[in-house]
Image (spheres, grey):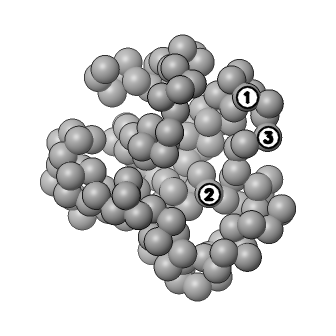
């Protein structure tokens, strides 16, 4: 599926729920960061994931801080990358898929991410700010 089809399927809710995993989150962020500035990509990704959760879940799985932090991490690596496809991007930075929690825990203490407030409002990193 090309990037436009992936984003369209996700936005419409046609993306198969059984395929919506961590890598799909990262891919959606990567696609939007290729089309928009970081602020707009954050807004589009958050809106898309929140809507998808309401369509295919019970609306309680969406986590604002995790989503925004994930986009910021992808943005950081995307700025360093020359990859022209998502597959090349994750091959260049495999930790985005294999060890993502480790990347987040460089910025956040676990207590911040598990704070109930983090689910509904973006909490800034307490260990290392995003640059």
Q: Residue at x 37, y 58 (%)?
A: 98
Label 1 secondary element: loop
Question: From the image, which quarter does the N terminus lie in?
Answer: top left
Residue picked out by circle 2: 66
Within 10 Å of disc 1 (Cα), the crowding (few <14, some 14-19, many 20+) is: few
Q: Residue at x 18, y 46 (%)?
A: 88
Alpha carbon distance from label 2 to label 3:
13 Å
Residue 57 visible in the snapshot: yes
Q: Is 126 displayed left or right of 103 in the figure?
A: right
For residue 111, which quarter of the picture? bottom right
Cβ atoms under marks 2 and 3 closer than 8 Å: no
Disc 2 vs disc 3: which is toward the camera? 3
For residue 58, which quarter of the picture? top right
Question: From the image, which quarter does the C terminus lie in?
Answer: bottom left
Q: Nearer the viewer, residue 39 or 100?
A: 100
Q: Residue at x 38, y 44 (%)?
A: 30
Cβ atoms under marks 3 and 1 closer than 8 Å: yes
Residue picked out by circle 1: 57
Label 3 secondary element: loop
Within 10 Å of disc 3 (Cα), the crowding (few <14, some 14-19, many 20+) is: few
Residue picked out by circle 3: 60
- Residue 11 lies, with reference to residue 40, above or below; the image says above
Mark with earlier residue (2, 1) = 1
Among all residues in the image, which is located at the extreme bottom?
127
Alpha carbon distance from label 3 to label 1:
7 Å
Number of marks in picture: 3
Cβ atoms under marks 2 and 1 closer than 8 Å: no
For residue 31, which quarter of the picture? top left
In the image, residue 22 lies at what x, y percent?
48, 45
Q: Nearer the viewer, residue 31 or 22?
A: 22
Mark with earlier residue (2, 3) = 3
């Amino acid at each position: 599926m090309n990037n436009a089809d992936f984003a369209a399927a996700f936005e419409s809710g046609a993306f198969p729920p059984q395929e919506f995993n961590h890598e799909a989150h990262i891919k959606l962020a990567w696609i939007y960061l290729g089309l928009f500035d970081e602020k707009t990509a954050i807004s589009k990704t958050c809106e898309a994931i929140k809507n998808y959760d309401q369509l295919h879940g019970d609306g309680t799985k969406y986590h604002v801080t995790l989503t925004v932090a994930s986009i910021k991490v992808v943005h950081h690596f995307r700025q360093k990358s020359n990859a022209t496809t998502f597959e090349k991007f994750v091959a260049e930075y495999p930790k985005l898929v294999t060890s993502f929690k480790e990347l987040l825990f460089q910025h956040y203490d676990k207590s911040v991410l598990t704070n109930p407030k983090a689910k509904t409002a973006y909490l800034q990193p307490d260990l290392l700010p995003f640059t």
